[in-house]
Amino acid sequence: MSDTPVIHIVDDDRAAREGLGFLLSSLGLTIACHASAADLLAALGDQAVGCILADVRMPTMTGLELLDELGRRDCPLPVIMITGHGDVPMAVRAMRAGAMDFFEKPVNGMALVERINEALRLSNERAQSLNERAQLTRQIESLTAREAEVARAVLAGRQNKQIAHDLGISLKTVENHRHNVMDKMQASSAADLVRRLVAAGWQAD
C-alpha cells in the first residue's frame, strides 16, 4: 500500500487532463492521468492516500457512475468533480452523492490546488483512521476466547471479583487474562482499553 499522495486526473479530453497534470506536477504534486473511469479503476489498487479529479461527462462511465462505483468499493480517496457550464446540475448531484466539491471549466488553478490540499489532508486522516482500525482488529483477533470474555466484562464495567464469579474461574486467572488483554491491546489503563474496544466497534452489554 502506497503512502505517497497521488492526484488522479480522469478526463477523456487529452488536452484537458495533460494541462491539469502539468499544472499540478509543476507544484511538486504526484499525479496520474487516466483517459477513462475504467482506466482509473484498473490503476487504483490499494492506493491509500490522494484524491481524484474526475470530469463529469465521459463516455462509457460518467463521473457520477464512477462516484457510485468508488462508493461500492469503499474507496477512501476524496473526489472533486470537473464540469462544463451545462453540467452544473449533474455536479451538484455528484456532491450529494459524496463528491467533495466541483469546479467549472476553465478551472481556476489556484482555487483547485487549495481544495486539493484540503482533500489530501482529509485523505491522510482517513488513512490514519483505517490503519488504526486495522491494527485494533488484529489485536482483538489475537485474543483467546476467554481473554475476549474478560475484555467484554471490563468494557461493561465489571470488577475482577465479579468477572471471576460470572465466569466461574479464580480471581488470579482473571487477573492473568486481564494482563494478557492489556498487553495484546497495548492499553496503558482500563480506561485506555475501553477506548480501544469502543473504537474497534465493541459495545458494552
Image (cartoon, helix red, strand yellow):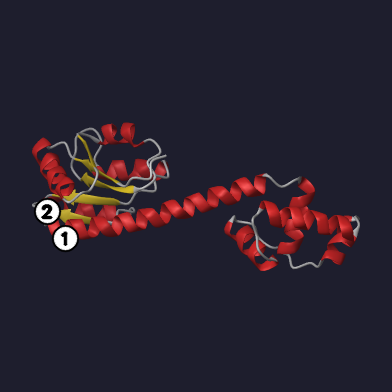
Examine the image and state in which quarter residue 100 appears: bottom left
Examine the image and state in which quarter residue 3 appears: top left
- Residue under the image location 17 percent in, 48 percent down: 24
> Seen in the image, is 63 located left or right of residue 131?
left
- Residue under the image location 43 percent in, 51 percent down: 127
Q: Secondary structure at mark 1?
A: helix
Q: Position of residue 78 (x, y in %)?
A: 32, 51
| 155 up-or-down from 42: above or below | below
Q: Which residue is mark 2?
A: 107
> Seen in the image, is 107 located left or right of residue 181?
left
Q: Amino acid at mark 2?
A: Val
Circles 1, 2 touching at the beta carbon (< 8 Å): yes
Q: Which residue is mark 1?
A: 111
Question: In this rendering, which labeled residue sits more in front, label 1 or label 2?
Answer: 1
Q: Amino acid at mark 1?
A: Ala
| 78 up-or-down from 187: above or below | above
Task: Say few, some or many: other residues with alpha carbon within 10 Å of mark 1 (under 14 / 14 to 19 / 20 or more).
Answer: few
